[in-house]
Image: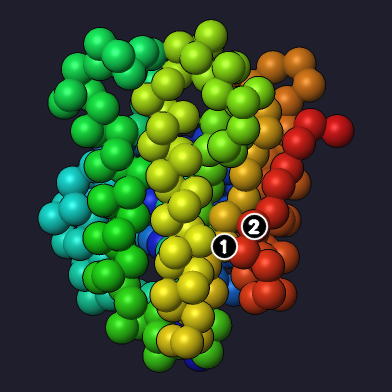
Amino acid sequence: MSKTLVVVGFGPGTATAVAERFGAEGFSLALVGRDEARLAAGVSALNARGISAFAFPADASDPASIRSAIRMVRAKLGSITVIHWNAYGGTDVGDVINADPAALHRIFDVAVFGLLAATDEALPDLKKSDNGAILVANGAFGEVSPEIDEYATNARVMGVALANAAKHKLVGLLAQRLKSDGVHVGEVMIYGTIKGTPTGSGNSIDPSAIAEQYWNLYGSRGETRAAVKPS
């Protein structure tokens, strides 16, 4: 039976490594994102490795756009097996005290509302699959602790920290809500920058190590959360 992985927020680093890891296991890949040139380059590179991949332009901050993309994936590739939510809302909100409401809303649109739209639209497929799953990327700012709160405040990424914490809670809620439906929900918390991305430098994390954590979460279907830190 064919298996399809939908990668929402495709780009260099984690998303590419996850696509390669699952593609090597026989998954067909649906690459979703706003940058059509990036999607086309990703499709070409994956096809060159013998992996079946297709581009589906969409905006992760727009629930209607994401729902439309999921429907197009289904029409072209058949039933969806896994959603990998790697979309990122940006760092426009440094200080939540004087935040532009529209900028803060957009970060939540990506972290929460887009993810919920993708989940709801793909859920009939995920439920009828023997191994349906939703695998979510999150950063260390999603952790709720005084140390992380202090770091996020000083680094002026308070908006992302707030949205990531909401996404962290959402993963746990979805894991409980969808357990009886046979849909596994997992999250990898990434504690550091990632090699091959604009912020990756020095002691950054190899994206293949992150992809392996996703593959393990998918295969074991036991743990909800995993973490990756620089070695």
The answer to whether residue 76 is seen in the rendering is: no
The amino acid type of the residue labelled 1 equals Gly
The answer to whether residue 75 is seen in the rendering is: yes
Marks 1 and 2 in Cβ contact (< 8 Å)? yes
Is 8 placed above or below 203 here?
Answer: below
Left or right, 97 with reference to 150? left
Residue at image mark 2: 225
Mark before the other along the chain sequence, 1 or 2: 1
Image quarter of residue 219: bottom right
Residue at image mark 1: 186
Instruction: Name the residue furthest front.
Output: 146
Is 157 placed above or below 222 here?
Answer: above
* Residue 172 image point, x, y percent: 51, 61
Left or right, 75 with reference to 196? left
Left or right, 34 with reference to 111? left
Q: What element carries label 2?
A: strand
Q: Residue at x 69, y 54 (%)?
A: 226
The local crowd at label 1, few if under 14, some if 14 to 19, many if 20 or more residues have their Cα within 10 Å, is many
Is 160 placed above or below 120 here?
Answer: above
* Residue 23 image point, x, y percent: 58, 64
The amino acid type of the residue labelled 2 equals Arg
Q: Residue at x 65, y 23 (%)?
A: 147
Give me the disc on residue 20.
none
Q: How far apart are marks 1 and 2 (CA)?
A: 6 Å
Q: Is mark 1 on a helix, strand or loop?
A: strand
Image quarter of residue 197: top right
